[in-house]
Structure formats: structure tokens, C-alpha cells
Image (spheres, rainbow, N blue to C red):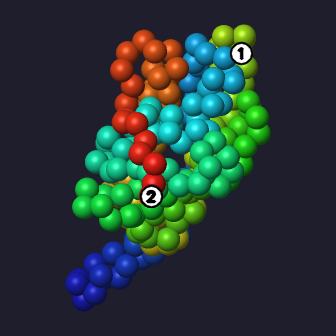
Amino acid sequence: MLILSLFVGALVGLLVALFCTPRVVEYVETIDIDANAASVYDAIRFQRDLMRWSAWPSETGSECKLAGDDGEVGAQTVFFDKKGNRFGHQSVTSLSPIREVSFTLESKGPPHVPSLSFYLIEMSEDTTRVLLSFRNDVTPPFHLIQRLIGITRWTREMHGKDLEGLKRFLEKRENYIGEPLAKAA
């Protein structure tokens, strides 16, 4: 009877966790950059530049290649693992000149719908505030698994590294993260 009670209690706890843990991960990170808004906009929308300052290629050990017209809606950064297998891509989905660049992300793994937008606010002629807005709607039960194994926290830390890399890239104060982006065949 004790074992049955423990089993039922564990099952109830799991069901509560599944239904009470938020499916949507959503946050905004902000950084001020000593560069004009047009330069910041171009460093984000041009994938060849974005992959030079982004933390993702170096932190994940992936190789990235460009597909489509760089700097335009529809341009993609295609991700390959160390063995050369394609495992995902990000696509430019929206551009509002000198104000906003948005992406969707697709990769192998559990069903989810991640999107990322950079919003630019001109603070002065030579200073731009960048708001990185991330949203990911993760299908149950994977939403719980992602939180338990730390993917949600790790992703947010990576976005912070991205903003720091963008700042270093534009301010040219030190080396930035990432490598030049190769052209896809």
C-alpha cells in the first residue's frame, strides 16, 4: 500500500509539473552600444557579420554557412555539426530599417517554435540601445525537460553572450566571438 501511495504521489507531482510549468519561454535582454543605429542594424541583419560576433558557433562547435540574399528577408544561416551534418537554420523573417530585425529558428530536436527579434532604440547619434527579445513555445512534455536540464537558462546566457559579442564587434574594443561566415554552395 505504501508503494502504491508513493507511486500515485509521484504521478500526481509529475502531472502538476507538466501542467503548471510554463510552455512559453519569453524574455528581453538589453545592452547599450557605442555605435550609430544604422551600423548596429547592419551588423545584425547581415548574417556574414552576425556569425562573426555571435556566441553560438564557437560555443556549440558548429559551422555556419549563408543561404539566400544576405541582409534580406529570407536569408538563412545554416548550421552544421562537426561531422558536416545540417541540423538547423535561422531565417531573417522581418526587417524594419534601423529599427528591428527578426528571425525564426529551426533545428532538430523536440517540437518548439523559437523566434528572436532585435529592437534598436537610438539613444544619441552614437549610442544605440539593443533589446533582444526571445520567445519559444515548447510542446509538452519537452517544456519541462528543457527547464530541468538547464537548456532554458543556457539559451538565455547565450543570448547575453551574443549581445556582448555585438557590442565588442561594433565598438572594436577587443576581439569578438565567432568566425567569418562561409558562403553555402
**Res 58 visible:** yes
Mark 2 surroundings within 10 Å by alpha-carbon count, few (fewer than 14), some (14 through 19), many (20 or more): few
- Residue at 42 percent of width and 12 percent of height: 173
Q: Nearer the viewer, mark 1 or mark 2?
A: 2
The part of the image, by quadrant, that contains residue 41 is top right
Find numbered disc 1 in the image and state the secondary structure of the residue it sits on.
Answer: strand
Kindly identify which numbered label has been placed on residue 123: 1
Residue under pointer 2: 185
**Amino acid bearing label 2:** Ala
Image-based side of 57 in relation to 111, left or right: left
Image-based side of 141 in relation to 71, left or right: left
The tag earlier along the polypeptide, 1 or 2, is: 1
Return the x and y of residue 9 as percentages of the image width and height.
35, 76
* Quadrant location, the C terminus: bottom left
Q: Is residue 54 above or below residue 80?
A: above
Find numbered disc 2 in the image and state the secondary structure of the residue it sits on.
Answer: loop
Compare residues 144 and 156 and report the one nearer the observer: 156
- Residue at 66 percent of width and 17 percent of height: 36
Count of numbered badges drawn on the protein: 2
Return the x and y of residue 120 as percentages of the image width and height.
69, 29
Compare residues 177 and 31 and report the one nearer the observer: 177
- Residue at 25 percent of width and 89 percent of height: 1
Q: Residue furthest front?
A: 185
